[in-house]
Image (cartoon, rainbow, N blue to C red):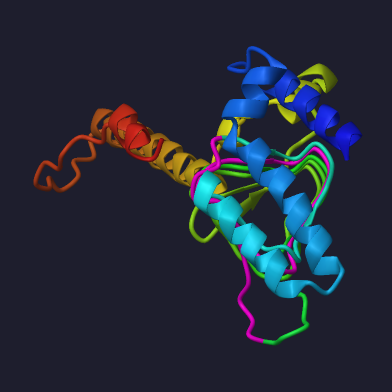
Amino acid sequence: MFDRVREDLASIMERDPAARSAWEIATCYPGFHAIVMHGWAQWCWRRNLKWLGRFTSQIARLFTGIEIHPGATIGRRVFIDHGFGVVIGETAEVGDDCTIYQGVTLGGTSLSKGAKRHPTLERGVIVGAGAKVLGGFTVGEGAKVGSNAVLTKEVPPGATAVGNPARIILKERGDPREEAAARMFAAYGVTPNGDDPLSKALHGLIDNAAAQELQITRILASLKCAGIDCESLAAAEKFNLAEMNKLVE
C-alpha cells in the first residue's frame, strides 16, 4: 500500500506543473485522497463487506467531491486532476497512468445487473474536463477524450475523440518526441493539431467554393473578351473566405 502511495505521489509530481512538493499533494489534492480512500472501500467490497465499502466511498465523495464505486478497478499512477464532479461506475476499469479531469463521468447505459456496464480505459488514456464516457466499451491505450465530449463507442489506441456525439480522429504517426510529450501531459485532452474532422471537412468545402468562385469569375472575363455577353444577374454578396473559415474554427 505504501509503495503505491509513494508511486502516486511521484507520478503527480511529474505530471502536474502546479505541484510543488509531495507534502502539498498528500494534503491538498482531492484526486489523490479519492484514490487512497477508494483502496479502502475496495478492500471492504472484495471481502463481501458491501455496505461498509459503499459507506466508505460516500465518505470519500463527501470530502473530495469525487465518487468512485468500490467495485470499480483503478490502476496504478492514476491522476484525477482537480476532480470535482468525477463519477466512476461499478464496472469501470481505469488502467495504469490514466489522467482524468474534473466533471468526467465513466457511466453505464445498461440496467443489466452483473453485466459490464461501464467503460474500460486502457493504459495512458486522458479524459478531458466534462467528458462523458458511457457504455461497456474500451478506450484504447494512449487515446484522448476531449473536454465535454460525449463518447458512446470504442476508441482505437492512440486516437482522439472530440465533440457531441464524439467523432474519432486517427492520428498519423509524427515526431516520436512530440508523441511522448503528449502522452506525458496533454491538458484536458487537448493536443496540438487535433482538429475536429467535421471542422476539417467544412474548411475543405469552403476552400473548394472559393476556388470555384474564382474560376467562374475568370470564365466570365474570358467570355466577355471574346465578345460573348452573359445575362447579368443581381449582384450577390461577395464570398469572404477568411470570415467563413473563422466561423468553423
At a point 20% along the width and 35% down the height, the residue shown is: 238
Residue 99: image quadrant is: top right
Determine which quarter of the picture holds residue 194.
top right
Which of these two is toward me, 214 or 6? 6
- Vertical comparison of 138 with 168: above or below: below
Of residues 214 and 120, the one nearer the viewer is: 120
Can residue 134 be spotted in the picture?
yes
214 vs 166, nearest the viewer: 166
Dominant secondary structure of the magenta stretch? loop
What's the residue at 78%, 51% (across, down)? 39
Query: Horizontally, is 34 left or right of 207 in the view?
Result: right
Query: Does the magenta portion include 105?
Result: yes
Q: Is residue 144 visible?
A: no
**Is residue 223 placed above or below 44 in the rendered structure?**
above
Give the residue at x 80% y 20%.
175
State left or right for residue 169 relative to residue 244.
Answer: right
Which range is magenta? Answer: 82-111
Say left or right for 239 vs 211.
left
Looking at the rendering, in which quadrant would you find the C terminus?
top left
Counting from the top left corner in percent of width and height, residue 27 is at 61, 27
Q: In the rendered image of this protein, does residue 50 appear above or below residue 127?
A: below
Count of residue discs? 0
- Residue 178, given in percent of the width and then of the height, sits at 75, 20
Q: Residue furthest bottom?
A: 112
Give the quadrant of residue 69.
Answer: bottom right
